[in-house]
Image (cartoon, rainbow, N blue to C red):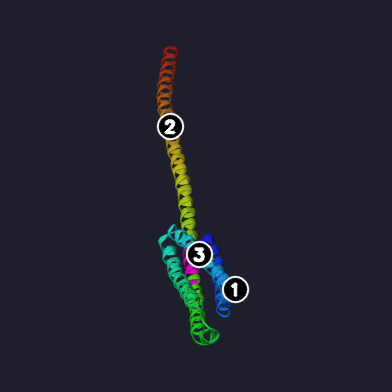
Amino acid sequence: MSEVFEGYERQYCELSANLTKKCSAAAALSGEQKKQKLSEVKAGLEDAEAMIRKMDLEARSLQPNVKAMLLAKLREYKSDLNNLKSEVKRIASGNLNPSARDELLESGMADALSASANQRSRLMTTTERLNQSSDRVKDSRRTMLETEELGVSILQDLHSQRQSLLHANNTLHGVDDNIGKSKRILTNMSRRMSRNKWIIGIIMSLLIVAIILVLYFKLF
């Protein structure tokens, strides 16, 4: 999940809780004090709306799977903000006498605050579920990256082995060439030895004939 979005989210939750307290306080006031408190609440509502717009822009700039989860959160926050606006309108509507104000505090405001509390409870539950989903997405992405790194490592090993095999193949070709050269040299040597044997044989034959002729002339 985006750290920027989480920062906006924390600020909004703190602002929303503070506005709820101020609404409760404004309901118990009257006159100028009430107007001043409501002015503070309305200013806080504008800040809350600005914070929601920031979260919306940040969520829409992210990847589709994360974007969908964050926009679901935003819908809950917008609903929560609308409830706060409704509470402010109820408090600001007309000049209430003390008995009517007490009745509002005991009935309407109690219901509104209860609804707001229930809304925040649902928001917390939804946020927790979305955070768990985000964690699962992060784990899946981490696993995918680890698998990708493993695949790259295997490909690099295979490439290295291929280079080793090509080098061994080239070495074998060099050995074959050397064996071929040696074979040709041995063949030439064998031919020369055979030729020398014939030459020696002829010379010996001539010597024997010459010896025989010499002996013949001496004896006869």
Of labels 1 and 2, earlier in sequence is: 1
Front residue of 7/93: it is 93
Front residue of 66/108: it is 108
Front residue of 52/84: it is 84
Mark 2 sits on what residue?
181
Mark 3 sits on what residue?
46
Measured as percent of width and height from the top left, residue 180 is found at 41, 34
- Label 2 or label 3, whichever lies nearer to me, is 3
Residue 198 shown left or right of residue 24 in the figure:
left
Can you tell which mark lies on residue 191?
none
Label 1 sits on what residue type? Gln
Mark 1 sits on what residue?
33
Label 3 sits on what residue type? Glu
Mark 2: secondary structure:
helix
- Label 1 or label 3, whichever lies nearer to me, is 1
Residue 195 occupies which quadrant of the picture?
Answer: top left
Of labels 2 and 3, earlier in sequence is: 3
| Predominant SS of the magenta segment | helix
Measured as percent of width and height from the top left, residue 126 is found at 47, 75
Quarter holding the C terminus is: top left
Does the image show residue 74? yes
What is the distance, in whole Å, between disc 1 and disc 3 at their CAs? 20 Å
Does the image show residue 144? no
Of labels 1 and 3, earlier in sequence is: 1
What is the distance, in whole Å, between disc 2 and disc 3 at their CAs? 93 Å
Q: Which region is colored magenta?
A: 132-141
Tally of marks: 3
Q: Is residue 75 rendered magenta in the image? A: no
Vertical placement of residue 112 versus 160, above or below: below
Residue visible at 54% across and 61% down in the picture: 3
